[in-house]
Image (cartoon, rainbow, N blue to C red):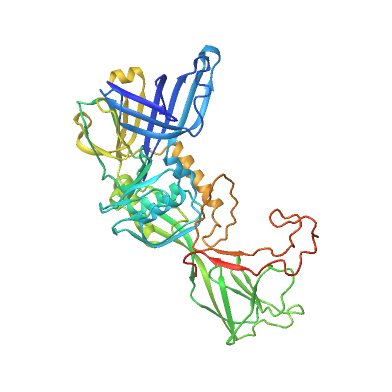
Amino acid sequence: MIYNKLTIGGVEYSDDTNISITSTIGNNNSASSFSINFINYTGRHATSFGVGDEVIIYADKDIVPATTKIFTGVIEKISFDGKGLNEKLVITGRDFMSRLTDAMVEPEVYNNQEISVIVADLVNKYVLGVTVAGVTAPGGTIHAFGGGIGGNPTFDPTTKTVSRVTFSSVSVFDAIKFLAELSTSIFRVDEEKQIHFESKSQSDSGYTFDNTNITKSKFKTSLNDVYNRIFVYGDRQQVRAPQESFNANGGSVFTLAYKPHDTQVEYLGNIQTGGILNFAENLQSGTQYYVDYNSKQIVFVSGTDAGADFIPVSGGSVFVDYDRSVPLIKFSENRESVEKYGPRTKWVVDKEITDGDYAKEKTLNFLREHKDPVVQGTLTIKGIASLTAGEYATVNVPNHNINNESFDMLEVRYSFTKKNNQKDEVITVTLNKRDDNIVDTMKGIINDVRNLQSGDVSSEDLITRYETGTGSVGIRTSGLVVRTRTVTGSAGIYDNPAFGIYGTSKYAVGSNAFTPYTIRYSGGYV
């Protein structure tokens, strides 16, 4: 028999009718949500719970009371339903992975940093209530980090270092997901509110699912998620276009091969002064040519407003140097998969990708995971009280042509009711690779909109901050200058709460009312 225990806000409750937990992994992460039902007879729980209360759930087999903590999260929604004696109450929420999805990264740039160092830094800077327990590098090295918020990481170098990565107003979740994809890793926040970041399929649950503990099983193989041709479309970059030369024929318009940026025009050995077409209402004095960006043209000017005729004479040589915008695009395909299943193409558009090596690695990793159909299974398990999505298990179901094969646990669902607990049928497991569903589609749309909204945010921007709160406030900065001065004599500042002296004039504070500034520097400031 399975026993469970529930505490909310530090108080134990035993009158729930159903506790559901769903622990699910995406391609590179694992997160959990919960739902708990109560009978709110005569309003007994009308004031018991509050949004933000911490929820802890324990479960064990044949142990009373249960002591194994399987879930920690917070209440995000409280719903009352019904009337009179039939009043019901449902509370729902998520585990502490929600802190990563809710927290936003201010513009950050990391240069030549090992990936686990960046993960720890992001969590320590921006996520409250989550600590960095340990980071397992792709090579298997475990790094220990101390202290949670503000903790100083100590670790050994690993093999995965990024030359440069920039995050601009993305969630901490999306930033770490980007790093997990780069290093073929997976991350989660456990029941102790500690983040784990480790290699995919390297965490063994230690369980084997077979006829001794499977009560129901279902497997299917599908082409729905097979892709064998992939385009990765990254951010656009400015590169120098080949110099273009023209022999003037008396005309004023010269058409380029690409839309120009940072244009330099040379005519008869002299650098010309340029402007932007239709940028100003009137022709600027001294302007010799305009750039028509959309038409890819250089337009020389003449006439009264220009002050002279700057159109090149026939036979003159015009040289144009400029930058052009090119996208970072990588393409890969698996020919064996194409021949077997036909071409199945996927476009990945991500403006956070600015490195060609990463774009190449992303295409190869994607092909590796999607070139063949995957087997997806659903099992109902008995005799086990706790499993973790993201770990793998051995599965032996010969009737479905599954013979001692390793499967990732993509989703673990708990349903604690009196009936399920007594039957020892609490856990349902989804194995291997899940199909995309409407939740995945909506999350992709939300992330795309967020990226559009933050597209112009730069790590060089000056941010003015306004915060309200009670207590002390810490400021993360590299240095601080404080200037102070005091009031001398009987003069003061009229109506000032600190220096105001009754009877003085607002306009007569005295020429010697203030001492000179005293400048104080914070430690280490240069």
Q: As rendered, which of 120 and 498 lies closer to the eye? A: 498
Q: As rendered, which of 235 and 199 lies closer to the eye? A: 199
Tell me the quadrant of the picture where the N terminus can be found.
top left
- Quadrant for residue 410, please give it: top left
The image position of residue 56, as x and y in percent, is 39, 31
Which residue is the extreme one toward the top? Answer: 85
Q: As rendered, which of 425 and 97 lies closer to the eye? A: 97
Q: As rendered, which of 274 and 139 lies closer to the eye? A: 139
**Location of residue 187 with respect to 82 vertically, above or below:** below
Task: Evaluate whether residue 347 shows in this view.
Answer: no
**Location of residue 216 with respect to 323 vertically, above or below:** above
The image position of residue 468, as x and y in percent, is 59, 46
Q: Is residue 230 left or right of residue 505?
A: left
Q: Is residue 383 left or right of residue 314?
A: left
Task: Evaluate whether residue 411 shows in this view.
Answer: yes
The image position of residue 457, as x and y in percent, is 55, 57
Which residue is the extreme one toward the front? Answer: 489
The image position of residue 464, as x and y in percent, is 60, 56
- Give the number of marks: 0
- Quadrant for residue 519, please give it: bottom right
Q: Residue at x 32, y 45 (%)?
A: 341
Q: Is residue 5 left or right of residue 311?
A: left
Q: Is residue 432 left or right of residue 126?
A: left
